[in-house]
Image: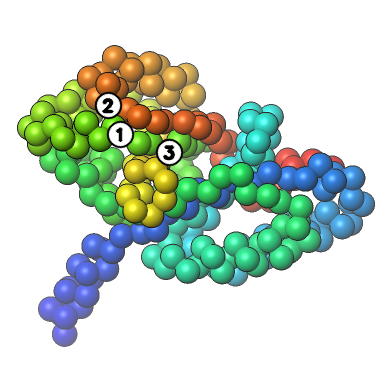
Amino acid sequence: MAKQQKEESATQDNRRQYVNFAFYKIDPAWRRLPEEDRHRGKCQFIDVVKSYEGEVIVNAYSLVGIRGDCDLMLWRISYDLDKFQEMTAKLLATDLGKYLTTPYSFLAMTKRSIYVDKHVHPDQEGTRLRLVPGQFKYLFVYPFVKTRAWYRLTPAARQGMMDEHIELGHRFPTVRLNTTYSFGLDDQEFVVAFESDKPEHFLDLVMELRHAETSNYTQRDTPIFTCRHRELVEALDLLGG
């Protein structure tokens, strides 16, 4: 029995998570609704999210005053892809959801990186199949695509450049990287999500990475979203009205 439980636990630990970054824009008409209507819509929205506790990890972020095309982002993580679709349908059916559009939505999965075998940190990015989001004030998210020339390089050449890339990242311990994989699932190859309490450290890190040799093989790394972590009720209140 103990052996069976151990095997089942190992299998569970090796499960890969589905990850979704869903960005929403509120219709300005929402802010002109009576307060009681907006309160009801927000309560319905929160109730839907709470109904998926234990099935979907949801962290809310506000982009109000930061970007013009997005106001709210839900970082969702689950072992069941269908839960994203079910939850979204219910969210959009709420009185708040009727005023939301989705300008961006990125789908990805966790996967262990082939480049991080030399990492010395036990919880270093690239070694994890399970994400634990929402521990920092800010999240910086963007889709990422490498050039086809990158994949034609030898494994040794790619590893050498990635060693430099990783070493640069380690110079900024206040920035935590969560890389997820979208090959075949979405338009991009990766969705990169950096967490930090220090936006200035992330800015400095990105500037440093521009000098790395890997930067020569970047095809696309925009749009970039700066997201402020909030409790869901607070993020919804920031929608205005």
Name the mark on residue 146: 1
Left or right of 240, for residue 89: left
Left or right of 129, for residue 238: right
Residue 160: percent from the left, percent from the top? 12, 27
Classify 237 as above or below 215. Answer: below
At x 41%, y 31%, the residue is 221
Crowd around label 1: few <14 · some 14–19 · many ≥20 (10 Å): some
**Foreground pick, 6 / 85:** 85
Q: CA distance from mark 1 to mark 2?
A: 6 Å
At x 67%, y 31%, the residue is 68
Classify 60 as above or below 138. Answer: below
Q: CA distance from mark 3 to mark 2?
A: 15 Å
- Secondary element under disc 1, as helix, strand or loop, is strand
At x 39%, y 58%, the residue is 18
Classify 150 as above or below 17. Answer: above
Disc 2 designates what residue? 217
**Quarter of the rendering containing residue 212:** top left
